[in-house]
Amino acid sequence: RTTASLAGPWVIGGSASRVIIPDGVTFTADQPFTANVELQGAAVINLNHEIGPDLVKVSPQSTVNFNAYPTVQAITYGHVVLSGTVEKRFQGDTTIIMGNLTVGQNLALKGSPGNASHVRLGGALTLKGARPLTAADNAIDVAFIGTTAQTVTSERDLHLFRMISQSAQ
């Protein structure tokens, strides 16, 4: 099976328990989903509900699509896609994205108060369409950490706290 989705709410308790999404599988969480989740290889998880899982282990080749889920946890990801109509917010602290960050239309790049959200990006940054202005104290700090050339593509204005290169390009 290469795709799976929820037919209803799913809660898995216990700190040692986890749902493993294997390489090549796309899992769509369109119902409340509370669990520890591990993404292996090129797994994809679509977070289409505002109640989502705790991502405890994420492969550098995987993709997390934040559609309805509003919070980007401060962990290490493969690729991240922010889409949908719900405002997304990066948690305070450091979020590492080994691959690409894609931001959909009408979504601001929003961080925690005091510009406390730091994103370390290994791939491309793509911002589609227009987006609302981010409050000056809720912007994010983006550092490019890739070892090859990285690109920034924005169809409109880009509002960040800071953008720097920390790579050896």
Image (cartoon, grey):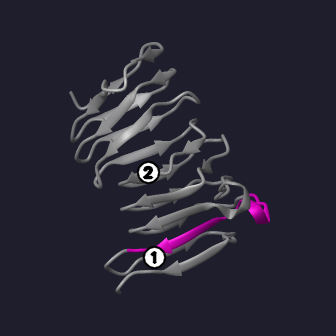
Q: Is residue 117 left or right of residue 7?
A: right
Magenta segment boundaries in residue numbering: 132-145
Q: Magenta span has 74?
A: no
Q: Nearer the viewer, mark 2 or mark 1?
A: 2
Q: Residue furthest front?
A: 15
For label 1, the residue is 151
| Residue under the point 22% across and 47% down | 41
| Residue under the point 63% across and 54% down | 105
Q: Nearer the viewer, residue 120 or 6?
A: 120
User: Looking at the image, is 115 positioned above or below residue 41?
Assistant: below
Identify the mark nearer the N-term, 2 or 1.
2
Q: Nearer the viewer, residue 69 or 139?
A: 139
| Residue under the point 46% across and 13% down | 8
Q: Could you say which quadrant of the image residue 54 lies in? A: top left
Q: Is residue 113 left or right of residue 154?
A: right
**Quadrant where the N terminus lies?**
top left
Q: Nearer the viewer, residue 22 or 13?
A: 13
For label 2, the residue is 75
| Residue under the point 41% across and 62% down | 100
